[in-house]
Image: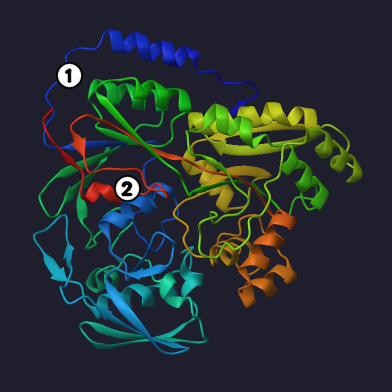
Amino acid sequence: MKIFNVFTTFSLIVLSLTTTSCHQQVEKPLNREIVFAMGQAPLNLDPRYATDAASERINRLIYQSLVDFDAQSKPNPSLATWRAISPTEYRFSLNQVPSTFHYPTALISSRLNANDVKATYDSFASLKDSPHAAEFDNIENIIVSDDRTLLFQLKKPDKHFPAKLIIGILPAALIAKNHDFSHSPVGSGPLKLLSWQNQLKLVRVSDGQTISLQEVKDPTVRVLKLLHGEVDVLQGELPPELVKYLQTKADILVKTNSGANFSYLGLNMQDPILKNLKVRQAIAHAIDRDAIIQKVMVSNTRVASAILPPEHYTNQQALPAYAYQPALARKLLLEAGIKLPLKLVYKTSTDAQRVRFATIMQAKMLPAGIQLEIRSLDWGTFFEEVKQGNFQLYGLTWVGIKTPEIYSKAFGSNSIPPNGFNRGRYADLELDQLLLDENWQAVTTRIHNQLPYIPLWYEGQFVAMRKGIHNFSPKPDGNWDDLATISRYAH
């Protein structure tokens, strides 16, 4: 464990990059493999368990789901189309052209059919520790009519049910054998597992293109590897100085886009201090979001006031962001009976960028009467601590969230882990009723006012790649879907 109480500077990093690039050797010819650098390796490639960003993004490529989403986050057919037979019955019809499961360790393949869909969703009933299991408690029965058709019967009406069927479909034969999908995934997506030892190697089914996903935690090292030709593509998780630096390099192409991934400050609502609303309001007003965005985040990062971005179809009215007002924060703390300075512990990962904005937050909170202690943990330990509720404050980002049901998962009284993502153990009967009524505007307003978490920003997206790499662009939610089409040409 590392405790950071000083501000991290990047001037030496840029100097190091400049010096190193001056002594670069002639770039070696690259082979067919495309190397994608990521800041954090996936933790679990079983879509029934995965919750971290890297796992979710890779699973979208290895597996296929019944449903996906359009640009406005409305559900769209993927593997299947559907029709509501009644308020509690939905009939799904798989695509005419069947998909094929890809077994990475044997010359075996089989076509995906309705029995595989049934087996995938039936399996949640026996998964006691799946964070997604509660999502499917409402399924009463799944009836297979033929290889392409199945009927989902629900215990109670749910007009949003199709939007929940985004879990990657697994082969029924392997589910029956308790196959370890978390480390040996078998799906029907555009990429399949080739090997997973020191790094994750995938192969594209359509043309045999191999793609290596290499974990490089240090952002400076990722940049150096890109400049030296050891890496072909990297996306996100860099401070703006390094992105700007890459934009000056003739052999590197940088693309940017506005983002939809939501960063927030998580609060332990069982903590006797944080239970006080005025304390939570004070913390919200003690964070200088604009300063952090300017100094740490890439372009197109936007201040946030709710999980779902303004362009989401459920957002009818913009909520005001909490402005940086340290004097008001001090006043609120005193009104709450807090003796200043208020000492709080903030947990984060060892990612350099996350540590850097934590140190800025730490400095900006001092005038508000808050003394922040930063504890930086390796990703696995940090995420486990968050899931177990072992924190006072923490920082994370919701990635790829599309449906408003996230508010139930994150703040519903019945969504305490492992039954959901209410990691702060927040309970509010008024909010529970609003969630039940699906009054999303009232839901977001209630959450905004009660602050069971503190919204920060929607991260801007960028990708940096070597010249010669084509057909890859940053997506608002940061997904890596273009690995299904990425290609290399001589330059």
Residue in the picture at 35% in, 23% down: 246
Residue in the picture at 32% in, 51% down: 58
Decide if residue 342 is on the left or right side of residue 118.
right
The amino acid on which the numbered mark 2 sits, given as a three-letter code, is Trp
Above or below, 127 against 211 in this view is below
Q: How is the image coloured?
A: rainbow
The N terminus - image quarter? top right
Q: Who comes first in sequence, dot 1 or dot 2?
A: 1
Residue in the picture at 15% in, 73% down: 97
Decide if residue 369 is on the left or right side of residue 313.
right
Residue tagged by mark 1?
27
The circle drawn on residue 50 is none
Q: Callout 2: few (<14), some (14-19), or many (20+) C-alpha neighbours within 10 Å? A: many
Which residue lies most toward the front here? 317
Above or below, 419 against 485 in this view is below
Question: How many discs appear?
Answer: 2
Figure quadrant of residue 23? top left
Residue in the picture at 35% in, 59% down: 46
**What is the distance, in whole Å, between disc 1 and disc 2 at their CAs?**
26 Å
Above or below, 251 against 389 in this view is above
What element does badge 2 sit on?
loop
Residue 436 locus on image (x, y percent): 63, 76
Above or below, 28 against 327 in this view is above
Residue 55 locus on image (x, y percent): 37, 51
Residue 25 locus on image (x, y percent): 20, 12
Q: Callout 1: few (<14), some (14-19), or many (20+) C-alpha neighbours within 10 Å? A: few
The amino acid on which the numbered mark 1 sits, given as a three-letter code, is Glu
Residue tagged by mark 2?
480
Decide if residue 108 is on the left or right side of residue 181.
left
Residue 455 locus on image (x, y percent): 63, 48
Q: Using the rendered image of the protein, determine whether residue 276 is visible from the camera's viewpoint.
A: no
